């Protein structure tokens, strides 16, 4: 069914935040039941990170706002409040699509002031969430960066990235390209509860394998580790073993943090599904967003021998024969600057 026939009549007054976002139209389709896509014309594409952020990149591009992956712990949830939407169900079901992001990016990359610094993709919401299959924004973004000589990195849970592996191989002949996959839950039932819109763990393992077979050196974010749910030795050992078998070169791991309005969204789910853990979480997180130092140290001690056993302590990311033989570190999402980095 044509998307042009699925336009939702929108009262601008009902979506006051979208007056700032350049709303073109809102679309619903049976292919994405329960999700509304708000198509906008972006005024800018490159986002500059704050000075002193401690991240290995200074610029990002986000093709979407909101994410149908619906991860309960997603640190980006509070950003939806800037659009006068809530950080809970609206974040999962009201997805903003930047239709012109590639064209705007090309214009910005032509500026004389642009220094061709690495641009990170997938630092806020996932660029390869399901809607990318319909909108195909990433090929234009990747091409614009490659043609301008700008290195890029991608972090995703989305298996749609496989579609763009040939394009990324072409890009890597001109610029350094780093590709990372996020996979922290190796239990199908738990994954469906906490990350209901994401591809299965097995599907992401196959994505890692495909990335390696395409000539890249995949790095995996084993993050966030969910206290008392995905932090057992058995779970972590099985996950790391599967990652090594799939061709992962290294991992980065840290415990879940629950910042701002993400915290009540996750805690409400926890109370409904694992009520016995609520008291433990209150002790672990207190009134803040981060686990105690004792838990961080405990998790580090648990993970270090497992990472060593499976040979996943490597730090060489990107592509084995990247442009100028300059392999770059994989970028991690913004919480890396504020959470414990184990490896």
Image (cartoon, rainbow, N blue to C red):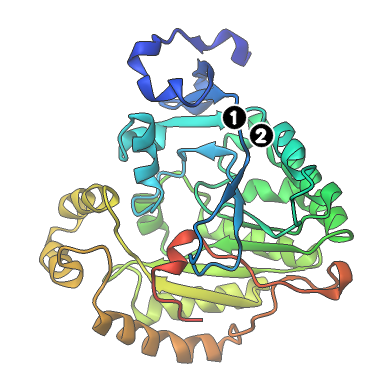
Residue in the foreground of this view, choosing between 42 and 166: 42
Q: Position of residue 160 (x, y in %)?
A: 65, 45
Give the Cα distance between marks 1 and 2: 6 Å
Give me the residue at 46% from left, 39% from top: 68
SS state under label 2:
helix
Q: Contact (CB < 8 A) between labels 1 and 2?
A: yes
Q: What count of labels does the image hold? A: 2
Q: Badge 1: few (under 14), some or many (20 or more) residues near its Cα, within 10 Å?
A: many
Q: 174 left or right of 108?
A: right
Question: x, y (%) of residue 234?
Answer: 39, 80
Give the residue number, with chain letter if any, for mark 1.
42
Residue positioned 74% across, 32% down in the render: 103
At label 2, counting other C-alpha atoms closer than 10 Å, the crowd grade (few under 14, some 14-19, many 20 or more) is many
The residue wearing badge 2 is 101
Check disc 1 and report its element: helix, strand or loop.
loop
**Residue 88 sits in which quadrant?**
top left
**Residue at 64% over, 27% down:** 99
Q: From this viewpoint, is residue 185 visible?
A: no
Residue 173: which quarter of the image? Answer: bottom right
């Amino acid at each position: 069914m044509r998307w042009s026939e699925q336009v939702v009549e929108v009262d601008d007054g009902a979506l006051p935040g979208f007056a700032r976002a350049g709303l073109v139209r809102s679309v619903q389709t049976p292919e994405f039941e329960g999700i509304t896509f708000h198509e906008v014309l972006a005024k800018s594409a490159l986002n500059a990170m704050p000075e002193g952020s401690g991240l290995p990149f200074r610029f990002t591009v986000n093709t979407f706002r909101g994410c149908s992956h619906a991860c309960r712990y997603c640190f980006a949830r509070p950003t939806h409040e800037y659009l006068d939407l809530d950080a809970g169900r609206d974040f999962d079901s009201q997805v903003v699509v930047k239709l012109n992001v590639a064209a705007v990016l090309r214009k910005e990359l032509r500026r004389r002031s642009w220094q061709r610094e690495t641009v990170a993709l997938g630092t806020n919401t996932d660029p390869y969430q399901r809607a990318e299959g319909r909108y195909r924004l990433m090929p234009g973004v990747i091409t614009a960066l490659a043609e301008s000589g700008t290195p890029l990195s991608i972090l995703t849970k989305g298996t749609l990235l496989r579609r763009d592996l040939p394009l990324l191989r072409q890009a890597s002949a001109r610029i350094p390209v780093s590709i990372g996959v996020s996979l922290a839950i190796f239990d199908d039932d738990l994954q469906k509860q906490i990350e209901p819109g994401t591809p299965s763990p097995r599907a992401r393992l196959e994505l890692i394998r495909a990335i390696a077979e395409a000539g890249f050196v995949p790095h995996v974010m084993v993050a966030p580790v969910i206290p008392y749910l995905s932090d057992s030795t058995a779970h972590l050992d099985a996950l790391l073993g599967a990652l090594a078998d799939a061709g992962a070169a290294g991992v980065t791991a840290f415990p879940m943090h629950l910042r701002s309005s993400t915290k009540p969204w996750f805690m409400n789910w926890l109370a409904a599904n694992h009520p016995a853990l609520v008291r433990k979480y209150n002790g672990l997180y207190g009134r803040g967003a981060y686990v105690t130092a004792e838990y961080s140290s405990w998790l580090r001690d648990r993970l270090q021998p497992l990472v060593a056993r499976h040979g996943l302590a490597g730090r060489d990311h990107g592509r084995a024969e990247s442009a100028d033989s300059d392999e770059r570190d994989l970028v991690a999402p913004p919480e890396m600057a504020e959470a414990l980095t184990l490896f």
